[in-house]
Amino acid sequence: MNERHEPVEEALGPEEIAKRADELARIMGEVAEREIGKELGTKIDELKGRGRELAREIRARRTILQVEVKDVRNEEDGTIETVRMDTGELVRSRRMTTDERQTNLLDLRKRKDKGKSDS
């Protein structure tokens, strides 16, 4: 149906947390060295920004990934399910809007009419 990329939260395992902690320590060391050397500019700001992001992920033990998802119509219960393309995992489910239900009725009618003309 509607394929796209969107952010999905995912838990971090112990190894991933340890990698992020190592990277955070390296970044903070590099920032300290650059500040001592009186370097100014965007590189320090970039490093600090990445450091804040890593610290947040380590504290939360979660990260946000951009993953490919698609919307799947569940006609039986009248919902649209957003599913990850890489794992098949359900991201969320919502009720179809009135327009989406109406579109479904029109599609069914077209298929029914086409079946009659093929006979």
Image (tube, grey):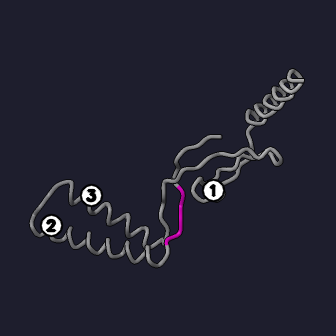
Q: Residue at x 58, y 43 (%)?
A: 3
The residue tagged with tag 2: helix, strand or loop? helix
In the picture as drawn, the residue positioned furthest to the top comes out as: 117
Q: Residue at x 78, y 34 (%)?
A: 104
**Kind of residue at disc 1:** Val
Q: Nearer the viewer, residue 1 or 103?
A: 1
The residue tagged with tag 3: helix, strand or loop? helix
Does residue 63 appear to the left or right of 29 in the view shown? right
Number of numbered discs overlaid on the protein picture: 3
- Measured in 3D between alpha carbons, the distance from the residue under mark 2 to the one under mark 1, in whole angstroms, is 43 Å
Q: Is 78 above or below relative to 66? A: above
**Kind of residue at disc 2:** Glu
Q: Nearer the viewer, residue 71 or 34?
A: 71
Q: Is residue 54 magenta?
A: no
Q: What residue did someone put label 2 on?
A: 35
| 2 vs 1, front mark | 1
The residue tagged with tag 1: helix, strand or loop? strand
Q: Nearer the viewer, residue 86 or 77?
A: 86
Q: Position of residue 62 (x, y in %)?
A: 49, 68
Q: What residue did someone put label 3 on?
A: 46
Looking at the image, tell me whether mark 2 or mark 1 is earlier in sequence order: 2
Q: Position of residue 1 (x, y in %)?
A: 65, 40
**Kind of residue at disc 3:** Glu
Q: What quarter of the picture does the C terminus occupy?
A: top right
In the picture as drawn, the residue positioned furthest to the left comes out as: 37
Does residue 95 appear to the left or right of 13 in the view shown? right
Q: Position of residue 11 (x, y in %)?
A: 53, 69
Q: What residue did someone put label 1 on?
A: 91
The magenta segment is: 8-12
Q: Residue at x 20, y 69 (%)?
A: 30
- Measured in 3D between alpha carbons, the distance from the residue under mark 3 to the one under mark 1, in whole angstroms, is 31 Å
